[in-house]
């Protein structure tokens, strides 16, 4: 009698995704990810929350490589929200060191892989060491024309929209813009994501099903994919699964 070899869930998932054939003509141009679950991942293992953030940083490296390989043009990662300042100071201090650590270690590889680093958010409120790290990465990768790696850092969508509306109002006051000429395109041009295509696909990990003040304007017609997998456990196989689901959907943008 032949005995079937026991396979782990990870092996089963890998085998399943190996059978997935993605349509190269229907890869989402812009994928946005709410990277959630680092703290819970650490708690399940009896570790401090910062251990989950550290492990999550390793997943970012894998997702950049996978996105580049599959032909994604922009990968936006929700790294730190305007609300995250409410967390305990030691955790916030650690999170503010992560961009510095990640970029210091990975910048040579990002340059080699033609990745362009961008930041969406209010940089002025970040610690000086964090600003220096991200500004260097932006400068050193500015001539790259491959994957755009866009970190949403100290970002909140409501704040972004309020500031955009203020900028539009100032133009109206100066007489450089007529109120009847204010359109969706005009407001979009004043958002922090100006110049980037709106996300085609939003992924959120950890089982939470909400947007958490993330790209509320830009996600109006994005496809959503939620998973219970915690961010430190998120793999290339999960990413491919999300893209397969995306490719099975029909995007109508309000039409039929």
Image (cartoon, rainbow, N blue to C red):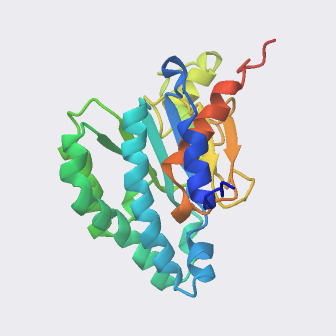
Q: Residue furthest right?
A: 256
Nearest the eye: 220 or 21: 21
For the point 59% across and 73% down, the residue is: 41
Q: Is residue 172 left or right of residue 66?
A: right
Quadrant location, the C terminus: top right
Quadrant location, the N terminus: bottom right
Residue 138 visible, this angle: yes
Q: Residue furthest front?
A: 1
For the point 44% across and 69% down, the residue is: 55
Q: How many numbered marks are there?
A: 0
Nearest the eye: 11 or 137: 11
Residue 56: % across, % down = 47, 65
From this view, report whether residue 145 is shown above or below residue 226: above
Residue 166 visible, this angle: no
Nearest the eye: 136 or 245: 245
From this view, report whether residue 167 is shown above or below residue 33: above
From this view, report whether residue 153 is shown above or below residue 246: below
Residue 132: % across, % down = 24, 61
Residue 105: % across, % down = 23, 62
Residue 189: % across, % down = 49, 28
For the point 41% across and 78% down, the residue is: 93
Residue 117 picture quarter = top left
For the point 35% across and 72% down, the residue is: 97
Q: Is residue 129 left or right of residue 93?
A: left
Nearest the eye: 212 or 57: 57
Q: Is residue 224 left or right of residue 8?
A: right
């Amino acid at each position: 009698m032949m005995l079937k070899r026991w396979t782990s869930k990870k092996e089963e998932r890998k085998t399943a995704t190996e059978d997935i054939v993605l349509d190269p003509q229907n890869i989402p141009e812009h994928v946005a990810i709410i990277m959630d679950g680092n703290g819970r991942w650490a708690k399940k293992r009896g570790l401090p929350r910062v251990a989950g953030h550290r492990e999550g940083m390793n997943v970012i490296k894998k997702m950049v490589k996978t996105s580049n390989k599959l032909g994604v043009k922009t990968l936006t990662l929700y790294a730190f929200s305007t609300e995250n300042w409410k967390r305990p100071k030691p955790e916030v201090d650690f999170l503010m060191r992560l961009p510095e650590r990640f970029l210091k270690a990975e910048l040579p590889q990002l340059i080699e892989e033609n990745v362009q680093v961008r930041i969406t958010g209010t940089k002025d409120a970040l610690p000086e060491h964090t600003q220096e790290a991200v500004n260097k990465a932006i400068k050193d990768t500015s001539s790259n024309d491959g994957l755009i790696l866009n970190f949403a850092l100290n970002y909140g969508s409501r704040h972004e929209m309020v500031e955009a509306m203020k900028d539009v109002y100032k133009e109206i006051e100066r007489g450089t813009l007529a109120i009847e000429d204010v359109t969706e395109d005009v407001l979009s041009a004043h958002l922090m994501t100006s110049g980037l295509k709106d996300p085609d696909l939003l992924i959120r990990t950890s089982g939470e099903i909400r947007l958490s003040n993330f790209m509320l304007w830009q996600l109006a017609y994005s496809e959503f994919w939620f998973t219970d997998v915690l961010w430190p456990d998120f793999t290339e196989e999960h990413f491919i699964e999300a893209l397969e689901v995306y490719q099975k959907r029909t995007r109508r943008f309000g039409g039929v």
